[in-house]
Image (tube, rainbow, N blue to C red):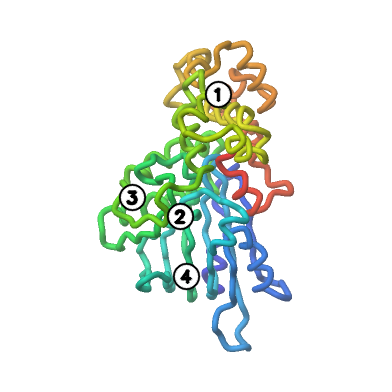
Amino acid sequence: MEELADDLTRPGDGQGAIASVHFTTTGIDSPFDAWRSLLDTLFDSLPPKMPPSSAFQANLLVHHFGTFLLCRSVAVGGRYRRTEARLAWNDLDHIVVSCLLRGAIAVAGPATRRLRPGDVAVLDLSAPMAFAMTAAEGVHLIVPRTLLPASTAPVHPVTGRILAQDTAMAIFVRGIIGALAEAALRLSPGEMMALGASVPELLASCLGPASAVTSTGAKGDLGRRLRRHIEENLHHSDLTPSRLTHDLHVSRSQLYRQFETSGGVEAYIRRRRLRRCLLTLCDSRHADRRIGDIAYEMGFADEAHFSRLFRRAFGLSPRGARSAARQDGPDLGGLFRLSTGGASFGDWLATLGTS
């Protein structure tokens, strides 16, 4: 385990500017309690069944790519559950794609499934789950549901699925995640933004549809249906509360209640449009597109008004953001609010895909 921890914390050769948070139990008096506190946003955690003399060890390194989190974890063991009570408490709406590198993980269900090194697990944080691990090292992508197509991440929660280590898609997904983990500490801001824009699409093409997976709910949660509908219709200029109540057959009070903690539904839609514009402006594949065309495509009727809103949200003009991306400038991290000053793993999870 010490060898794995050393691998996890060893710095890269380059001067990567990617934002990261690192946690280790080394030197902590109550290591499992600290580990449990770190993962509290995700799971109810129980210590591993190990002799009292054995010391618990764990490390977690998290990289923020702007649109998703890349995590590398090493832990002696433990038992972890995401219960209905926890789902109601924090309502995380992300898909986790995990590659087991070493050790063993047993996933509970109607029939216990055991992951072998090289297997890829696709888990839905909106669905209950339980698993136990022993001396496990893994690499994980945490992606907001709305960045994946509805065929891969439907609005209703789905039970986990496992891609066996020797299947073509497991090999390909493992290669993508492994390459990201190896390159993370060497990436420049511009490279990080480019990958942040393209990896979710590439991942979705590998995972394919989830229709064959048994659903845990028939209709799905209203909040997830609303967020999915908004994400797929940001380009419509008439995406208003009235349109949402009509399209999804909900009352205004139901609609407004879903976005109370987000500053209101109109503020949420505006942030998502601005964020989509920011991603497009920083994506080299769209380098030749007019800024006005990008704004109009995202439902903004006036380019000057869009520019004012953009500067207010990100501190730079749209042209300045595009220039920073082209020049690989240090301002990119600030644009995507990736500063680690006071940030925590829980903070990043809570805001990923919502700002």
The mark nearer the N terminus, 1 or 2, is: 2
Mark 4 surroundings: few (<14), some (14-19) or many (≥20) residues within 10 A: some
Residue beneath the point at 64% across and 19% down: 317
Q: State the image quarter where residue 86 is shown.
A: bottom right
The mark nearer the N terminus, 4 or 1, is: 4
Cα distance in 3D space between marks 4 and 3 = 21 Å
Mark closer to the observer (4, 1):
1
Q: Nearer the viewer, residue 266 or 332?
A: 266
Residue ID for mark 1: 240
Mark 3 surroundings: few (<14), some (14-19) or many (≥20) residues within 10 A: some
Whether pointer 2 and pointer 4 mark residues with C-beta atoms closer than 8 Å, the reply is no
Left or right: 66, with 95 as reference point: right
**Figure check: 120 above or below 328:** below
Whether pointer 2 and pointer 3 mark residues with C-beta atoms closer than 8 Å, the reply is no
The mark nearer the N terminus, 4 or 3, is: 4
Q: Secondary structure at mark 3?
A: loop
Residue ID for mark 2: 124
Asked if residue 178 shows in the view, the reply is: no
Asked if residue 175 shows in the view, the reply is: yes
